[in-house]
Image (tube, rainbow, N blue to C red):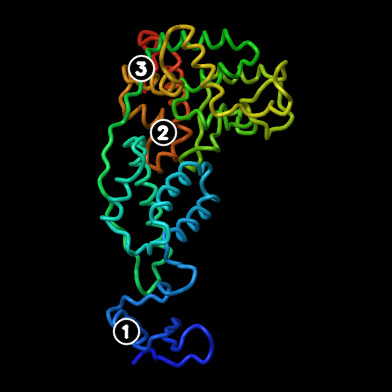
Amino acid sequence: MQGKIVKNTGKGGKYIVRFQKVFKRFNDLDKAERFLNALRFKFDEGLFDERDYMLGEPLAFSTFADQWLKMKESKVRCMRNLKCHMQYATDYFKNTNIRNIDYPELEDFFEQLPQHLSDKTRHNIKATLHSFWTWVIKRNRKAKVKIIMPEFPDIEFESEYMPIIDKETQQTVLQELKRITPFNRKIYICALWLSTYVNVRPIEMIHIREKDIDLHNGIMYITHNKEKRPKKTYLLDEDIELIKSFPTAIDKEMYFFRHEKRKGVHKAKRGQFGKDYVYTWWRKACKNLNVDCPLYSGTKHSTVVALGEEYTPEQIRKWGTGHTNNKSFDRYLQVQGEQKRKLFASARCTTGAQRKVANLKF
């Protein structure tokens, strides 16, 4: 039979149970025999995993959580939410064997989360944990005892209503933004482009560098993007000329949307716009006009709704926002370039009548 009990001549117990790579000391022979029989039973049932008895608890939830976060640091640009979600889970499960966590334990975990967390946040925590478990299962697929995906409780939520504005109001806000930021034209340009190039998110826009803008072909490359794949925007002729009006940057690694040299701004802070910089000025412009609409919904969302008056959702999705899983679509980029410029030009028109006059049909 597998395993044996030997007398211990050293310190730490009178008897030692040896079973494959498991070594455990006991002072009581009866307890040692029961432990050995339990190991043999698990082995016969195919449930024996030596990691359950190792020092350092390699199957502990907290152990896997630390490993997963370290792995993610090299692949994810913003770790704040992942770390926050996993901290909630680690504080609750601690060193619990990950194979012992299933639906009841997960349901109890979500029940004890702070009451102030929204259903959307709880849903995001669930998504993070599901991704975490998927990684754990793949990492341990060659183990003798498999780790299985637990059943997660249902967490329903309703997306919050995003306020939008019509194109005329949007243009009014943009003009007010332009008026109150004469010290740096790029604040206005950033908001203008967000309302035009609807396939670019605010955080992606401020990460555009000088080298990402190809004026010869009229293309702006979005290298810092959520999709983590090549992404480009076809610039309108007026925007190409607008870019040319700025002094040529010597360092092509510089961010395009950056602070200008001016009084009150230290030279150490003349780099890239912060993630909330344009948002803050947009809100100021809105406040001056008694308009209540944040930057993202006031630019991209409002523009997409306005475009819906003239174009089908499929046209807007494929040639505008870029929300598609059809990778073969990239083969026709040269053909789509002019079509995309037409849609972006239509996005800048203030009324449906202007878009019809422009004859911007696909």
Residue that appears at 51% across and 33% down: 232
> Does residue 53 sit above or below 90 in this rendering?
below
> Does residue 284 sit above or below 28 in this rendering?
above
User: Residue type at mark 3?
Assistant: Ala
Badge 3 marks a residue whose secondary structure is helix
Report the mark closest to the observer, 2 or 1: 1
> Does residue 246 sit above or below 129 in this rendering?
above
Marks 3/1: CA–CA distance: 74 Å
In the rendered structure, which disc, 2 or 1, sits on the residue that comes first in sequence? 1
In the rendered structure, which disc, 2 or 3, sits on the residue that comes first in sequence? 3
Marks 2/1: CA–CA distance: 63 Å
Residue at the disc numbered 2? 322
Is residue 231 found left or right of 154 in the rendered image?
A: right
Badge 1 marks a residue whose secondary structure is helix
Query: Residue 23: horizontal and vertical position, in percent?
Result: 45, 82
Query: Residue 113: horizontal and vertical position, in percent?
Result: 35, 43
User: Residue type at mark 2?
Assistant: Gly
Badge 2 marks a residue whose secondary structure is loop
Residue at the disc numbered 1? 34
User: Residue type at mark 1?
Assistant: Arg
Q: Quadrant of residue 57?
A: bottom left
Residue at the disc numbered 3? 306
Q: Mark 3: few, some, or many residues within 10 Å (few <14, many ≥20)?
A: many
